[in-house]
Amino acid sequence: MRRLGVLIPLVLFVALVTLFYFRLYAGDPQKLPSALIGREAPEFTLPPLDGLTFADGAAVPGLARKDLGNGQVTVINVFASWCAPCRDEHPLLERLARMNRVKLVGLAYKDEPQNTLKFLSEMGNPFSAVGRDDKGRAAIDWGVYGVPETFVIGKDGRIAYKHIGPLTEASLTDVLLPEIDKAERGSTSALLR
């Protein structure tokens, strides 16, 4: 009986560790369903990043719901200067911007403005607009799990696709660009990747 008293807590502990392991590491987090796919982008208005300018010296504007859709596919990248994977994916965002296929905008998530400015000054600014989400409130409305995340917004202002995690060469060419193609045609993805 005494052995059973020691074994039960041990078995329960092993079961909990196994459960936590599978919930954290098993499965593909990019296959999580998103309730926002096919719905209009949430209402938001984010201030610009003071001091961020285009090459001609004009200020880069902030970001609002009214800037999305309007007959053009928009890609929103949620990023932060403190996010190491954001640095890794940044060259791919610059390449996407050079393609001139979509309007690429950024949402600076829970970041100090001076750090965001330094990040974009060092890495380059691929965005046509950058909104500061200092407290993360807009990101909550978008259903952001963490950074980086990338959304494709259709011409009609509806969320067509959501990519969780950093973009890679493969995810850009094999997933994001085909999702942009779908959004240009007016169809939306049932699942996020």
Image (tube, rainbow, N blue to C red):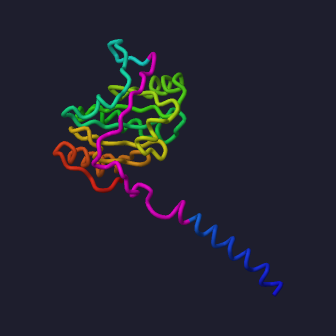
Q: x, y (%) of residue 108? A: 46, 31
Q: Could you tell me which residue is drawn at 35 percent across and 28 percent down?
A: 64
Badge count: 0
Q: Quadrant of residue 45?
A: top left
Residue 59, percent from left and from top: 37, 15
Magenta span dominant secondary structure: loop
In the rendered image, residue 25 lying in the magenta stretch gets the answer yes
Residue at left offset 46%, top offset 41%: 140
Where residue 82 appears, x then y in whole percent? 54, 35
Residue farthest toward the right in the current orientation of the protein: 2
User: Is 18 displayed left or right of 90 in the figure?
Assistant: right
Name which residue lies at 21% across and 39% down: 156
Relative to 190, is 147 on the left or the right?
right
Name above or below for residue 130 compared with residue 39: above
| Start-end of magenta stretch | 22-51
| Vertical placement of residue 7 versus 51, above or below | below
Which residue of the protein is positioned furthest toward the left in this rendering? Answer: 185
Quarter the N terminus occupies: bottom right
Q: Residue furthest bottom?
A: 1
Q: Residue at x 35, y 26 (%)?
A: 129
The answer to whether 183 is drawn above or below residue 190 in the figure is: above
Residue 188 at x, y percent in the picture: 24, 50
Left or right: residue 136 compared with residue 129:
right
* Left or right of 19 on screen, residue 98: left
